[in-house]
Amino acid sequence: MRDGSPFPLANLPYGSFSVGARAKDRAVGVAIGDQVLDLAAVARATNAPFADVVGGAVINPLMSAGPQVWKAVRDGITGWFTDERLRAVVEPHLYPLEGVTLHLPIDAGDYVDFYSSEHHAINAGRILRPGSEPLSPQWKHLPVGYHGRAGTIVVSGSPVIRPWGQVRQANGEGPLFRPSAALDIEAELGFIVGVPSRLGHPVPISSFADHVFGVVILNDWSARDIQAWEYVPLGPFLGKSFLTSISGWVVPIAALEAARTEPPARVPTPLPYLDDRDHPWGFDITLQVAVNGFPLSRPPFSSMYWTAAQQLAHMTSNGAAVRSGDIFGSGTVSGPTRDQYGSFLEMSWGGAQPFQLPDGSVRSYLVDGDEVVISATAPASDGGTLGLGEVRGRVESPRHD
């Protein structure tokens, strides 16, 4: 295993991969060092009891099998790589990471995105509603969110086609229908539901790890000019629904145990169903945003006001059920300084303060040809660092067909 790899034995993220031109021959894989293990092939070769749940093209059957099976699979993989007697069984089913194609690792269910960074919410409020209170009255009482479109969730590397939409004219007259001129990113984490819940039965904070399987890096691409015209009174719609990209590797919650941390203090104290003092699910995860190879910012996930456990508790508090493959986004991750912002909206202060890239080019929002890469790292249980992979997307010109 290559030293310094984002995928040490303490990580073991799951994905869907194919080799060469055989894109139809997808299999569930596990990243280990600079290689990918064909999980089903080794499970069958070793007569592992979990062979059936890892034998498909996506990880939904594994995710829905529950925490006991998750642990059995993780323990089994660890055993394969630490038992020298199994080397001859395992090695024929390892492929160089650089030689495989990653596909969407899940069959995505519902998609919900939140708005849970206080730094981002305050910045956005000051930019979009100058002279008003930046936080809405309910923001510190509940995790604010919206429902998106699962059908436009794509894997890292998929093209980002600039969307068309209605935008407000600068002179205040009626809207125009044109390609977005304010295409933006939102650097986030996405949490993926494994075990479904029952309709009418809320999921308490204490049951978070019984339902949530793992984490991906998520980019909630946003057309700010379309969003600004449409979002009152019901919130984001076409300015968000055109594309959401996720990383190809799903890092199990179990791999992030060493990254757990206390979330920020909450004032006022949340209502009882959101009170997480006995079950804190903050994570010490650092994201990095890079454009065209130039690092721009390092948003700290540990600063998020609302945790994923609180988000799950809130979105099921009315009895709504979650299904295997449902994704809920953390919301844009931002820290208190510009080098920790998770969106161009903040970096350019709504376009009023364009910034310069190291190559001399200037940005307020993304231009065609820009490539955005969001990566993330976290402490690992072995005392080192693990990676969550990356989510990558290149902006393409709007389509006219």
Image: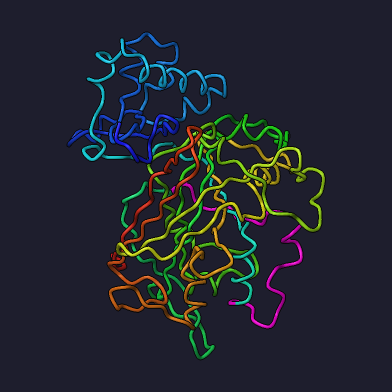
Rendering colour mode: rainbow
Relative image position of residue 323 (x, y in whole percent): 57, 35
Q: Which residue is drawn at the image coordinates 47% and 76% (left, top)? A: 348
Q: Which residue is drawn at the image coordinates 26% and 33% (left, top)? A: 18
- Of 221 and 286, the residue lying toward us: 286
Q: Which residue is drawn at the image coordinates 68% and 32% (left, top)? A: 207
Chief SS of the magenta region = loop
**Residue 366 sits above or below residue 352 on the image:** above
**Residue 52 sits above or below residue 245 on the image:** above
User: With 125 as the anchor, is 370 left or right in this view?
Assistant: left
* Most distant residue in the left direction: 21
Q: Quadrant of residue 100?
A: top left
Question: What residue range appears in magenta?
Answer: 127-152
Q: Which residue is drawn at the image coordinates 51% and 77% (left, top)? A: 350
Relative image position of residue 162 (x, y in whole percent): 36, 66
* Most distant residue in the bottom direction: 171
Q: Where's the N terminus, which quadrant? A: top left
Q: Does the magenta stretch include residue 137?
A: yes
Relative image position of residue 220 (x, y in whole percent): 47, 57
Q: Quadrant of residue 132?
A: bottom right
- Of 299 and 323, the residue lying toward us: 299
Relative image position of residue 277 (x, y in whole percent): 76, 43
